[in-house]
Image (spheres, helix red, strand yellow):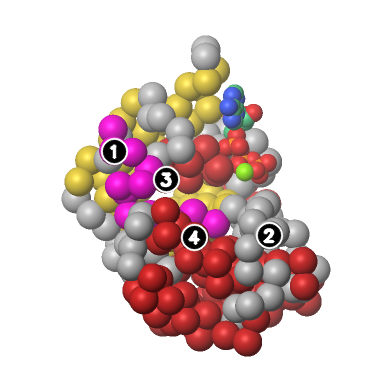
């Protein structure tokens, strides 16, 4: 469903992504992991269309999207700093992108209700973000992505601002949500536990190069090199 064919990225003279190729299956939960600065966010942003591609090809649903604007890519991205609109209610925040697309009010209403039910936010739809907990706000941010029913979800460290307990709880909810919605998910984290518990396949990155791709248990038991072994918690 999503494929990266030898993609690279340069900022000026500095090359930060080197020849990354990956074929992601429909409904797969892919987790990109690696140390700070290895290029995780840059890869997500290129898939979302928020960053241009310096070389190679990105395909979504078979179509080359290198020159397709973000809005036409059928992807939705959830960020770490999920700024909600403070003056709008939860429901208005979730429906905002559909409103911008000039969808009919009744359609927006039903999609927001549906997403709120999935996320357990039904009773909060009329509240302002300031009156929510961190986990509830994070769910609203996900709700904004869900209402658009994208083919592909992109998550950039969505749980890193939450406390440990909430992070564990939201992790389980995320996994359930993925199974329920049947979408392709590409998830970025630098948390090994998160990667091990969420991923169908883990992609380990270092300095813009893929080091290893595999199911969590395979990567753990058979790290490709010293770096991946250390990173995944099974050093040589
Ligand atoms: P973190 O875990 O800290 O979020 P990351 O893996 O997401 O790190 P990226 O944000 O993708 O890393 O950055 C990869 C490299 O590209 C870094 O060296 C960064 O400094 C560089 N970089 C990112 N954006 C730009 C930019 N707009 N201009 C120049 N360099 C950039
Ligand atoms: Mg990042």
Report which residue position mark 1 lands on.
68
- Farthest residue, direction front: 105
What is the CA distance from the residue labelled 1 to the residue labelled 2?
32 Å
Question: Of the numbered discs in the image, which one, if any, rests on residue 186?
Answer: none
- Distance, label 2 to label 3, CA atoms, is 27 Å
Q: Which is closer to the viewer, label 2 or label 3?
A: 2
Judging depth in this view, the residue of 235 and 172 nearest the camera is 172
Left or right for 1, reference 52: left
- Disc 1 or disc 2, which is closer to the eye? 2
Residue 22, position in %: x, y?
35, 48
What is the C-alpha distance between the residues marked 3 and 4?
19 Å
Q: What residue did someone put label 2 on? A: 87
Marks 3/1: CA distance?
10 Å
The secondary element bearing badge 3 is classed as helix
Which secondary structure, mark 1?
A: loop
Query: In the rendered image of this protein, does residue 97 appear above or below residue 116?
Result: above
Q: Nearer the viewer, mark 3 or mark 4?
A: 4
For marks 1 and 2 on the same chain, the one whose residue lies earlier in the sequence:
1
Viewer-nearest residue: 116 or 51: 116
- Residue placed under numbered mark 3 in the picture: 48
Mark with earlier residue (2, 4): 2
Label 2 close to label 4 by CB (< 8 Å): no
**Residue 194 image offset from top left, x and y in percent:** 63, 66
Residue located 49% across and 60% down the image: 96
């Amino acid at each position: 469903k999503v494929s990266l064919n030898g993609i690279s990225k340069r900022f000026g003279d500095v090359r930060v992504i080197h020849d990354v190729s990956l074929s992601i299956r429909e409904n797969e939960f892919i987790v990109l992991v690696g140390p700070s600065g290895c290029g995780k966010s840059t890869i997500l942003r290129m898939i979302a269309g928020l960053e241009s591609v310096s070389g190679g090809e990105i395909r979504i649903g078979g179509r080359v999207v290198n020159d397709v604007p973000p809005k036409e890519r059928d992807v939705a991205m959830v960020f770490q700093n999920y700024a909600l609109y403070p003056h709008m209610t939860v429901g208005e925040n979730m429906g905002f992108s559909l409103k911008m697309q000039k969808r009919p009010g009744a359609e927006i209403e039903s999609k927001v209700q549906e997403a709120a039910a999935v996320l357990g936010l039904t009773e909060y739809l009329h509240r302002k973000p300031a009156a929510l907990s961190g986990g509830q706000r994070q769910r609203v941010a996900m709700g904004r992505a869900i209402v658009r029913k994208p083919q592909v979800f992109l998550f950039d460290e969505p749980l890193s601002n939450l406390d440990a307990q909430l992070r564990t709880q939201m992790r389980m909810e995320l996994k359930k949500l993925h199974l329920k919605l049947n979408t392709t998910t590409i998830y970025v984290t630098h948390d090994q536990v998160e990667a091990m518990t969420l991923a169908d396949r883990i992609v380990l990155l270092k300095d813009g190069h893929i080091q290893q791709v595999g199911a969590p248990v395979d990567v753990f038991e058979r790290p490709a090199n010293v770096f991946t072994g250390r990173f995944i918690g099974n050093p040589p």
